[in-house]
């Protein structure tokens, strides 16, 4: 379940993430990889939701064809994203690209 | 006689007598379910919003009051706060009030049930179990809706707190001055409750499975956290006896604490080092406070359990380094992973073994999973630069196992050198002597290592071939069985002939009845649970090597357990009557009638 179709090229031990891309309609997205040991467990999920809530944009986290609200810890937990999962962060709104920069940085830093 | 006598595990010693107070978090199970008129809905919405807000400020306040040593639990509270603020919970519940026209409790229950459904569908057990956090949070909100009458703050007088289980938030929240002791249905020796109870010096008994069936609010109970017994509605005679015992115990405790920092030295000058066995980092404070002269056994398993992935070398390094730094210059003995049998990592799953106690465990497990073993050893070697660390391999049964373990260790040293990472390759290396095979070849093993540590719990089980958790045979667990006494003596002598030190780290070290004969063998170090250190040191300081040696001679001549037990009990009874009252002993084994 954790393997998205891009897993081969994106799974990276350094937490390298894709570049924020804008599709023209104000929707930005970025590929992220869960590199912290325990995956998106309670503590990182809490951190992620907490930080996402600071932005006005609507932020979603996508895994394969599941989309959840990145501002909801419960939604994030139900993704059950373990270490090595490749996810897409999407944001729509005025501060979208700022939000994605900030949140993808958290993935890179293992939510420390 | 008391109305009921319940048994559990004493995890923090002491005695208390008082009224039972149930922290009854399950009261909301009888939920009021009502449909409401349109006009009543705004009021109901406001009730729910207020309940969420009150629960939030309550939890935030708990977070603020969290003492620094419990900082790990702040993370748990943070995630609970996030759940409390999650639109998926509060939003759904409020939505149900509006759309379905139902009361707040019912709406919240429905919202929780929906979330539960989503979690139940997950394959991964870690994520599936997070639904527990959702329930705990919802219970807090439910309590607010119910008017909060039963919350901790309502506790007026000093009570015996009873609960199914205590969460970290519960224990932080309670005003400990109002709690005389706690008793829970769940929990083990190393649970959060245990550590907290011991650090607050509150008597506690856990694992009382029948608690909820036999005790109700306001009943008078005696908590005997020396023996792990709860007496419900005791008789006059029991009350008098326990009041007296409580007074004497407190007096005795105060006395032994005053002297626990003095060395473990007999009247005639034999010095035995008294160290602490710990399992979790937090226990280091109680090891120091109780007069531990170092950590004789750090059970490193804890950092591996209850998690999905393996800890990294850096994580382990940080943990070991901090431990070494706190104890420095005192010794810290790190036992390498002792998994298998009853302890398993989620990462490996439960092995399908017919007989796990004799299966792939401890050093065998590590020698099979060398990656994991090396990660741990590299962390230990690195941490050994910062303090007085020793490494110890568990469950050695042969010379080749020692050599294989050493080979792995040398490889770690070589790889650290190659990577240019600071490490200390000169740390003392020891092995656990806990199998009959290791006893028989102790002379051979002693030439290979720097120290022995005799693990009597397993040694007794493997030598006598019994499982002490099996009620039909647990009475056969006899530390003074001639085979055990001779085995220990043999290992000690073999170590001394080879010029190495020998320690003993099983429960025998904390048993006042066993201490004199261990001293008689000239054991160099004992390592025991921190709470038992003051009492054991007191015995050591009041005895002489001469009497220990003479007792040992008599015990070694005895051919029957009953004779040995009798000899030892008589001696302690004459010399240390107080210990007889306060300590339970491994020698008091009761045969369970086969019904």
Image (spheres, rainbow, N blue to C red):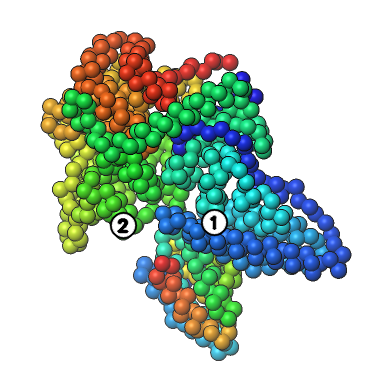
Q: Do the dots labelled 2 and 1 sit on one chain?
A: yes
Above or below, B473 relative to B264: above
Indicate the secondary structure of the residue bearing disc 1: helix
Q: From what the image shows, is residue B383 above or below residue B569?
A: below
Looking at the image, is B482 positioned above or below residue B355? above
Residue B483 visible in image:
yes
Contact between labelled residues 1 and 2, with CB atoms less than 8 Å apart: no
Chain holding disc 1: B
Label 2 vs 1, first from the N-terminus: 1
Query: Whole-Å distance between the Cαs marked 2 and 1?
Result: 27 Å
Residue B125 is situated, as x and y percent measured from the top left of the image, at: 53, 51
Q: Residue at x 47, y 82 (%)?
A: A20
Camera-side residue of B448 and B101: B101
Where residue B549 appears, x then y in whole percent?
A: 21, 18
| Residue corresponding to mark 1 | B127
Is residue B214 or residue B234 the one in the foreground?
Answer: B234
Q: Chain of mark 2?
A: B
Q: Residues within 10 Å of mark 1 (few under 14, many from 20)?
A: many
**In the figure, B209 relative to B5: above or below?**
below
**Rendered-image quadrant of the N terminus of chain B:** top right
x, y percent for residue A100 = 49, 79
- For residue B356, side relative to residue B167 (left or right): left
Does residue B367 show up? no
The residue that disc 2 covers is B318
In the structure shown, which secondary structural element does the residue marked by tag 2 occupy? helix
Residue B174 x %, y %: 55, 50
């Amino acid at each position: 379940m954790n393997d998205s179709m891009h897993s081969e090229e994106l799974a990276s031990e350094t937490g390298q993430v894709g570049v924020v891309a804008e599709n023209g309609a104000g929707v930005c997205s970025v590929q992220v990889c869960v590199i912290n040991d325990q995956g998106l467990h309670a503590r990182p999920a809490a951190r992620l939701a907490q930080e996402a809530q600071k932005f006005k944009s609507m932020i979603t986290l996508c895994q394969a064809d599941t989309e959840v609200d990145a501002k909801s810890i419960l939604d994030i937990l139900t993704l059950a994203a373990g270490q090595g999962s490749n996810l897409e962060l999407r944001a729509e709104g005025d501060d979208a690209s700022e939000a994605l920069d900030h949140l993808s940085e958290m993935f890179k830093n293992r939510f420390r | 006689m008391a109305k009921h006598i319940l048994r559990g595990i004493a995890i923090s010693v002491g005695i208390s007598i008082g009224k039972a107070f149930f922290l009854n978090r399950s009261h909301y199970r009888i939920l009021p379910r009502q449909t409401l008129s349109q006009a009543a809905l705004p009021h109901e919405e406001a009730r729910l919003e207020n309940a969420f807000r009150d629960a939030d400020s309550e939890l935030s306040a708990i977070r603020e009051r969290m003492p620094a040593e419990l900082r790990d639990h702040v993370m748990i509270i943070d995630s609970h706060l996030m759940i409390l603020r999650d639109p998926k919970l509060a939003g759904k519940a409020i939505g149900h009030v509006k759309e379905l026209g139902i009361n707040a409790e019912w709406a919240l229950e429905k919202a929780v049930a929906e979330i539960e459904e989503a979690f139940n569908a997950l394959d991964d057990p870690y994520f599936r179990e997070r639904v527990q956090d959702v329930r705990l949070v919802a219970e807090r909100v439910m309590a607010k809706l119910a008017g909060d009458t039963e919350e901790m703050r309502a506790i007026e007088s000093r009570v015996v707190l009873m609960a199914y289980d205590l969460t970290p938030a519960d224990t932080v929240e309670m005003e400990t001055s109002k709690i005389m002791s706690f008793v829970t249905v769940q929990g083990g020796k190393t649970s959060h409750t245990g550590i907290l109870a011991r650090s607050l010096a509150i008597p506690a008994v856990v694992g009382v499975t029948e608690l909820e069936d036999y005790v109700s609010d306001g009943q008078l109970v005696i908590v005997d956290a020396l023996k792990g017994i709860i007496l419900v509605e005791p008789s006059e005679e029991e009350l008098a006896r326990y009041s007296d015992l409580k007074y004497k115990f407190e007096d005795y405790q105060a006395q032994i604490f005053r002297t626990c920092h003095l060395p473990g030295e007999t009247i005639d000058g034999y010095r035995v080092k008294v160290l602490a066995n710990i399992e979790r980092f937090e226990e280091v404070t109680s090891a120091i406070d109780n007069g531990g002269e170092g950590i004789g056994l750090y059970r490193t398993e804890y950092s591996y359990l209850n998690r999905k992935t393996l800890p990294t070398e850096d994580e382990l390094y940080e943990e070991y380094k901090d431990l070494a730094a706190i104890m420095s210059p005192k010794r810290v003995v790190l036992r390498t992973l002792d998994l298998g049998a009853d302890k398993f990592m989620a990462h490996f799953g439960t092995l399908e073994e017919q007989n796990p106690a004799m299966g792939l465990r401890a050093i065998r497990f590590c020698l099979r999973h060398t990656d994991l073993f090396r990660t741990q050893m590299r962390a230990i070697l690195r941490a050994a630069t910062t303090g007085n660390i020793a490494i110890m391999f568990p469950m050695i049964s042969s010379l080749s196992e020692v050599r294989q373990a050493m080979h792995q260790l040398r490889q770690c040293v070589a790889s650290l050198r190659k990577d240019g990472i600071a490490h200390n390759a000169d740390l003392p290396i020891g092995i656990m002597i806990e199998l009959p095979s290791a006893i028989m070849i102790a002379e051979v093993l002693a030439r290979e290592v720097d120290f022995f540590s005799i693990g009597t719990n397993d040694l007794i089980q493997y030598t006598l071939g019994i499982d002490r958790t099996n009620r039909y045979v647990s009475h056969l667990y006899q530390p003074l069985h001639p085979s055990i006494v001779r085995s220990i003596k043999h290992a000690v002598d073999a170590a001394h002939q080879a010029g190495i030190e020998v320690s003993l780290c099983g429960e025998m070290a904390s048993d006042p009845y066993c201490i004199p004969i261990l001293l008689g063998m000239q054991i160099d170090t004992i390592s025991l649970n921190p709470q038992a250190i003051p009492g054991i040191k007191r015995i050591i300081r009041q005895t002489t090597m001469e009497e220990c040696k003479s007792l040992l001679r008599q015990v070694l001549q005895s051919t029957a357990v009953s004779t040995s037990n009798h000899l030892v009990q008589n001696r302690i009874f004459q010399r240390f009557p107080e210990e007889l009252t306060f300590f339970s002993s491994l020698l008091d084994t009761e045969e369970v009638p086969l019904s």
